[in-house]
Amino acid sequence: MFHKIAILGVGLIGASFGLAARKKGICGEIAGYGRSMANLERAKNKGAIDSFSDDPALVCRDADLVMLSTPVGSFKGLVARISGSLKKGAIVTDAGSVKGDLVSSLEAIMPEGVRYIGAHPIAGSELSGADAAYDSLFAGARCIVTPTKKSDPGALKKIQDLWLKLEAVVVEMDPESHDRVYAAVSHLPHLVAYAMVNTVADIDGSYLPMAGQGFKDMTRIAGSSPELWRDICLMNRKNLISMLALFQKNLDSLSSYLTAEEEGALEREFRKARDLRESIG
């Protein structure tokens, strides 16, 4: 599908993308950019990329596809740095967890003849870096593609076909809807996980080693990259602020039930949550 792919940010997602693209035979050459030479070397040794540089413009030279997989806060700066190296006909896409205004901002700064299509594979883990990457990360996972009225139809189809070849389930969604959905089911849970660990530490940090599997399961995602999630939360802060208020309302209700020793109300809330959780598998 592509002669050369440039991956900017060769961490878990970027390196897994390179491994999957190579496995499926959709590209001839893969070049990688990142800030850590050691991580880039590991990515090359693993087969995720063929070459690398700390100069993103050099990596993108002659690339048919550019994948942005750094923290989302760096996307616009990276595009500005690579703009002069992007050839006409190239497609820029991303794996960012936030779309919204970012999509229109990126569309606006694309050089003439270069197309941008936003995407978000719903895959990953609390681990980071090329060492954690594997070639089947996206198999069976949803990939949300977020076109706009300005999107080039040919580029959109090519990105959709790319993710289908990587065995993802492609779902089309407008950027604003994407951010509302994933603020609720991804970004808010990360905030809660971080807050839960910090709350126990505030109570008494010596309690943490005593935690069982339930606490570990609930807070697993608190092991995710702080830099990555800082950018995601700030860029989707409007949705998150309103959802945090609703979450606080639910916490306040539980607190009032405990204070009043309302057994029925507590059990009702727990049953409701259990039934909803079981409905999603």
Image (spheres, rainbow, N blue to C red):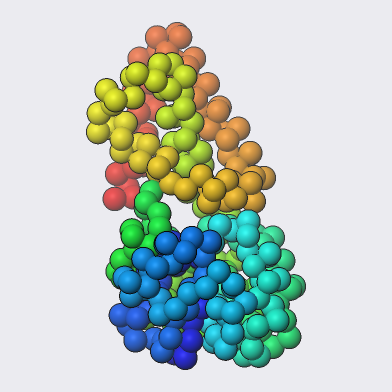
Residue lying furthest left? 213
Residue 193: x and y in percent read 44, 36
User: Percent from the top left, x then y, of residue 211?
Assistant: 28, 26
**Quarter of the figure that contains the N terminus:** bottom left
Up/down of 1 relative to 119, above or below: below
The quadrant holding residue 45 is bottom left
User: Where residue 265 appears, x then y in whole percent?
Assistant: 40, 20
Image height of 156 relative to 3, above or below = above
- Closest to the observer: 199 or 179? 199
Residue located at (54% from left, 48% from top): 227
Residue at (37, 36) in percent of width and height: 219
Number of marks drawn: 0
In-image side of 137 versus 69 (left or right): left
Classify 96 as above or below 66: above
Q: Is residue 160 visible?
A: no
Q: Compare residues 149 and 267 and report the one nearer the observer.
A: 149
Residue placed furthest toward the top: 260
Locate residue 17: give its quadrant.
bottom left
Q: Nearer the viewer, residue 262 or 82?
A: 82
Residue at left 72%, top 66%?
105
Left or right of residue 118: residue 138? left
Residue at 46%, 27% in the rendered image:
198
Image check: 80 left or right of 193? right
Q: Position of residue 16 (x, y in %)?
A: 37, 68
In the image, residue 188 above or below residue 112: above
Is residue 22 visible to the viewer in this orientation of the structure? yes
